[in-house]
Image: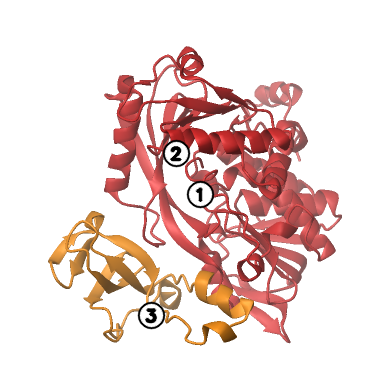
Chain colours: A orange, B red
Amino acid sequence: MMMIECPWCGKRDQSEFTAHGEAHIARPLDTFGLSDQQWGDYVFFRSNPKGLHYERWVHSFGCRQWFNVARNTATDEVYASYKPGEAKPIIKATTSRAKK
Amino acid sequence: MNKYSIFNLARQAKNYHQNWQAAWRSPEPKKHYDVVIVGGGGHGLATAYYLAKECGITNVAVLEKGWIGGGNTGRNTTIIRSNYLWDESAALYDHAVDLWGGLSQELNYNVMYSPRGVLHVAHSVHDLQEIGRRGNAIHLNGIKSKFMTPEEIVKMVPYMNLDCRFPVMGGLFQQLGGTARHDAVAWGYARAADALGVDIIQNCEVTGFDIKGGTVKGMATSKGKISADKVGVVVAGHCSVLADMAGFRLPIESFPLQALVSEPVKPCVDQVIMSNGVHAYISQSDKGELVIGASSDLYTSYTQRGGFDVIEDTLQAIVELYPALSRMKMLRQWGGIVDVTVDRSPILSKTPVDNLFFNCGWGTGGFKATPGSGHVFAHSIAEGNMHPYAAPFSIDRFNSGALVDEGAASAVAH
């Protein structure tokens, strides 16, 4: 069972949280100037890495706050949690591809 | 290739079955192939088979990182159906159902296709409206199915507790839906493709693509460099990893999806019965095990495990609907990595790299489409243009907005 550190509540079981995918995708500012190609890329395309992943979570059955998590999707190891607006922590992790 | 027949069985019995050929060769990879298929699951092997059989391209290799049938092909719950909402999906999935019918004869391998019927039950007015809309849509597409009242359901499935927490209010039954033996599908396609000259290379992982001037020329693998005129990537959960090697992204996220089987018991579940509302579905294998599918875990992951809370939710729903199963022991549980698109429809497409084709995004329900997917993908690769059944599933739809939204039809049954 995966344990996740909520920056406000501390370490809790994963089933209290909901994942919301890749973090640090900024909404484009020039919304009227965007082509269909750019809109599609922003809305639907994701890096979906095998290895280090920065992602958004919300503590749905707890404090209901949003935050970001750095996790290894190849092992489900959680490296760090940090509040929204904070910079990505540097994780010295190798993806499973790099390991080989 | 030794043909499998009653006469050969008798002939081999005289030699105590010592002289059967291996089902396929295990060759070392050649330096060059006309087409390389990356991924030796059902879809990849079917693609190679139809390339050799129908498109006349026999200089083909299938590269498999692990072993044949060890990925999602051997990890799903073997359900076959084609009751999808949109015309594009109905055409593609029903093409597969057509091919399932004659597959055992065609491959000379018993894939144990059993059209025992698939029943979707509805637990709310909303569910009823959804199956009503989808049922009418699939009737218009000529796919046989019927609506059922609670009285008809209880006659067909007497052990179902209709008066449960979310009472069963009706159902949609597709008669030609059913199951097939998933391992046999992979092995049957592998054996038949091998007999036509396709090289099946196991334990051979692709580690990078050789791309020159925007065209794929070959790939680096754990067994050395291989050049190819065309490359088809059919790797399910790992498609984003392969796309990353080729320098582009996909509109896909990968999730673990779990299933479990019980101890074997006498025949009791005659159909495939699924409920989107409470997320429970169940069928019985020919060995007697009850095969139960859970929902996917709700966070991306490449671990073929999944969380226990998901299994707990699924079994709660199963026990509520089928109280008689409350004391069944579950024997095995496993997870597979599913590649999910936002519209829950697959991607069969050209890519930003010329001569590199992707067949992925089947998400939680790719097994049912295996023959159809391989068939249309083989024709698409051979002709360099997507087959009419595959064309609506281009990767461009995520930029043009022409999504094929099958969220309701593919929410549960895999």
According to the image, label 1 marks what residue? B364
Q: In which image quadrant can residue B378 be found?
A: bottom right
Residue type at mark 1: give it.
Answer: Thr
Viewport quadrant of the N terminus of chain B: top right
State whether discs 1 and 2 lie on one chain.
yes
Q: Residue at x 76, y 65 (%)?
A: B35
Real-space Cα separation, disc 3 to disc 2, in angstroms: 33 Å
**Foreground residue, B297 or B375?**
B297
| Picture layout, residue B322 above or below residue B45 | above
Mark 3 closeness class: few <14, some 14–19, many ≥20 residues within 10 Å: some
Q: Crowding at label 2, few (<14), some or many (≥20) Cα neighbours within 10 Å? A: some
Q: Chain of mark 1?
A: B
Q: Secondary structure at mark 3?
A: loop
Helix, strand or loop at mark 1: loop
Q: Nearer the viewer, residue A23 or B271?
A: A23
Residue marked by disc 2: B276
Q: Residue furthest right?
A: B56
The disc label shown at residue B275, or none: none
Element class at badge 2 = loop
Mark nearest the camera among 1 and 2 is 2
Give the residue displayed 39% in from the left and 67% down from the top: A21
How packed is label 1: few (under 14 Cα within 10 Å), some, or many (20 or more)?
A: many
Q: Amino acid at mark 2?
A: Asn
Disc 3 designates what residue? Answer: A24
Label 2 marks a residue whose chain is: B
Kind of residue sitting beneath label 3: His
